[in-house]
Image: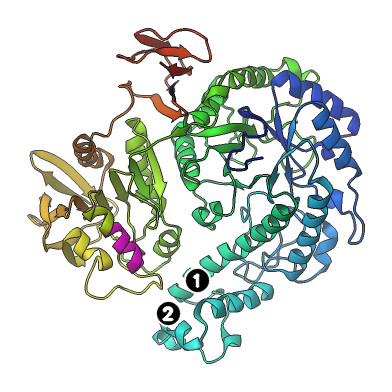
Amino acid sequence: MNKNTILAKTGQILYGGDYNPEQWPESVWKEDMRLMRLAGVNFVSIGIFSWAKLQPTEKTFDFGWLDRLMYLLGENGIWADLATATASPPPWMSRYPDLLAVDVDGHVYSHGSRQHFSPSSPTYLRFAEALVKKIAARYAKHPALAAWHLNNEYACHMNMCYGEASAKAFRLWLKERYHTLDALNAAWGTAFWSQHYSAWEDVQPPRKTPMFSNPAQTLDFHRFTNAAFLKIAKMECAILRKATPDLPITTNLMSFFKPLDYFEWAKELDFVSWDSYPDPLDYGELIGARGHDLTRSLKPGRPFVLMEQVTSHVNWRPVNVAKPVGTMRLWSHQSVARGADGVMFFQWRQAASGAEKYHGSMVPHSPDPEKTRVFQEVRELGAELKKLEPVAGTLVRSRAAIVVDWETWWALELPSKPTEFNYLAAIEPVHRYFYERNIAVDFVTPQSDLSGYSLVVAPTLYLLRGKDAKHLDRYVREGGTFLATCFSGIVDENERIVPGGYPGHLRETLGLWIEEWWPLGPSETRKVRLGAKALSGSRWSEVIHLKGAKALATFEEGYLKGKPAVTRHALGKGQAFYVGTVLDDSSLGVLLDDLSRGLKLAAPIKAPKGVEVTLREGGGKRFLFLLNHNGKAVRLPLGRLKGTDLISGRKSGKAVLLKASDVAVIELE
């Protein structure tokens, strides 16, 4: 099997859900198989929370039920995404004192929920390794096995552990990173506040302190936490790859999840997958699109899988509204439109007990689930996804990119800044611009290959290594267009101010230096003039001095009146722009519209507001996705584009009529 594609073994768009038959008597399983076949299910995740069932005591294992389940799936033509079951240790393991995680206040977590373990616990690592080895050996050659599923939503509920096991592991991690205490003291700036270390044993996690913790120490603890969880995943991957070198491995990520650097995680996975739960009351299609775009970007050149979503309603919000009729179908097709080759749900059959018994499912609580609205929508979606088989393996191609850097996120949101920054609040308006104009956009890191992008936008890239700044500078000099927004390039990887003036390593690229910052109050705004256009900034302003750049826009009021607010620097074959305030959405749109027009970035076709348009390409084929998020019908002219709608089977003609919440997938001629 070629594990570079998740479809090499299935040959279909994956469809199914998280299946937990251990919660039900085996008499229910055969009915599950019948309903799965009826719904078009071809792929299920199993065993995710089954550790206690597989290993009921420290010295005993029970795989009989899983053997019977795997046989049943194979008999019914359903592929298994078999989990390593390490997501939640069984109760007996909590007898070991190092297992349980400890929060920043010193409180010890208890068994009774999930993810209560310390990622640095030797006990956890020992038992997890043994379990994965047994599962891998037992099922490596099983004909129903299509993929491995590591753990589940790593670090979702418990991430930063401050217990003794973590303290010991943190010191070992620091020794590997810095080698000597002198190097550690220099990196952490321990001359400040009398924090100089003379023994490794004195170094602790950044536990509760009376005032600000050392920012470099806290940043390193973020890095360590990411590495501690990734160590678990790497351990599991090594076992699975030895047993099944040709089977793909994944784990379910969670989009913009702060504790884990998903670009690092994606390097260890054969395909990426994620869990999407946008609130139907909160512009869910935009939030879903942003998550799809990030997940697609983590593993360039490969489709991803939407591993979890809900059919109707979740159980963990104050008010758990159901998705309106048609929304589940629409949002499922959105994932395929933005690069997914699999559409999955949590979960298959709604639980009868436990903390998630009110979470929606593919088979809801009902004496006759087959006749429920939810199951009928599930069945209809399954039939439609079968028609999209030609789309599988094709890709979304982008010429625009947004820089995302997890270490910037960790460092930027540490306390004691000139103003309080929210990293996602800087990223979201930029993504929203491209989404609303149907311009394909990827997310990249400062280290990514940028050669294929005409425009790269870096919102508030606060932390920037010198080598990464050189990489961005080279991108511009070789013909790229780069846009950085305020408070970028300020510190290096150790959270130290880059000497020579702001914006540090970006000074030459941007052709300017910044004398001082002028944060604005919550209700303050500043008028900005861009030629004949009136723009508006808020929250931030700064005194910019030009050193090669030219002012495109100036502040129009206050102390900074007449001083640069937006600049452009011609550099080599390219150009670098800088924005010294936080532009509102409309003003940001004016600036990005100018850049997009100049770079000929445009949607595949023109569409009215609320209609999402994407293009997937590959193997000489092109597929135009049209999704109507409006509550009314719309008519879309296609111009010279012609093709056949894979869902309806109809020729497209000169225009497509989309009903409210409707979808068309046109294979273009």
| Magenta region includes residue 69 | no
143 vs 163, left or right, is right
> Which element carries disc 1, helix, strand or loop?
helix
Q: Can the viewer see residue 557? A: no
> Which element carries disc 2, helix, strand or loop?
helix
345 vs 602, left or right, is right
Location of residue 99 (image quadrant): bottom right
Q: Give the range drawn in magenta.
A: 462-473
Residue 224: x percent and y percent? 56, 68
Q: Do the residues labelled 2 and 1 touch (CB within 8 Å)?
A: yes
Answer above or below: position of 545 versus 528.
Answer: below
Which residue is at 48% across, 33% downward? 284
Q: Quadrant of the C terminus?
A: top left
Dot 1 crowding, Cα within 10 Å, few <14, some 14–19, many 20+: many
- The residue tagged 1 is 220
Name the mark on residue 187.
2
Location of residue 561 (image quadrant): bottom left
| Magenta region includes residue 471 | yes
Give the Cα distance between marks 2 and 1.
Answer: 10 Å
Answer above or below: position of 182 versus 434.
Answer: below
Residue 598: x percent and y percent? 18, 37
Q: Quadrant of the N terminus?
A: top right
Which residue is at 80% across, 31% downward? 73
Residue 176: x percent and y percent? 56, 77
The residue type indicated by label 1 comes to Asp
